[in-house]
Image (spheres, grey):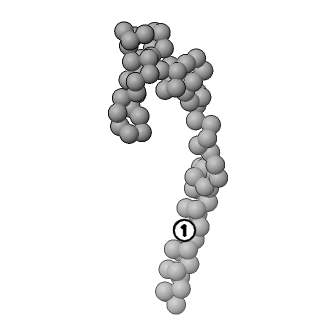
Amino acid sequence: MRQTPRCGAKTRRGTACQAPSVRGKKRCRMHGGAKGSGAPVGNQNAFKHGMYTHDSLEFQKHVRDLLREGSRIIEEF
């Protein structure tokens, strides 16, 4: 047990993890060496509110253009 390779992850304190790594991996079971661990494929949590969707950005641009044109017309009078 003492001869096994150790996990290469850093802990919260900044020191190296002392747990033994999973066979055939560089990390322990708690830091991503276990089967099924880690983030899911694809970023499913990125879309939260829709503020930066293509349609929303186009609408914001349209509103800005209308405001600029309106203020330009007001200044002409």
Q: Residue furthest front?
A: 2
Q: Is residue 14 left or right of residue 70?
A: left
Can residue 3 be seen here?
yes
Q: Position of residue 35 (x, y in %)?
A: 58, 17
Q: Which residue is mark 1?
A: 64
Relative to the observer, which residue lies in front, 11 or 51? 11
Q: How many marks?
A: 1
Q: Position of residue 5 (x, y in %)?
A: 38, 13
Q: Is residue 38 above or below residue 43?
A: above
State which quadrant residue 26 falls in.
Answer: top left
State which quadrant residue 27 falls in.
Answer: top left
Relative to the observer, which residue lies in front, 77 or 34? 34
- In percent of the image, x 57 and y 52: which residue is there? 52
- In percent of the image, x 54 and y 68: which residue is there? 64
Q: Is residue 6 above or below residue 52?
A: above
Relative to the observer, which residue lies in front, 9 or 19? 19
Q: Is residue 27 above or below residue 68?
A: above
Q: Secondary structure at mark 1?
A: helix
- In percent of the image, x 44 and y 17: which residue is there? 20
Q: Residue furthest bottom?
A: 77
Q: Is residue 71 left or right of residue 48?
A: left
Q: Is residue 76 above or below residue 24?
A: below
Crowdedness near tag 1: few (<14), some (14–19) or many (≥20) residues, C-alpha within 10 Å = few
Relative to the observer, which residue lies in front, 9 or 45? 9
Q: Position of residue 56 (x, y in %)?
A: 62, 55
- In percent of the image, x 59 and y 43: which residue is there? 46
Q: Position of residue 49 (x, y in %)?
A: 64, 52
Can residue 55 be seen here?
no
Amino acid type, callout 1: Arg
Say which quadrant the N terminus sits in: top left
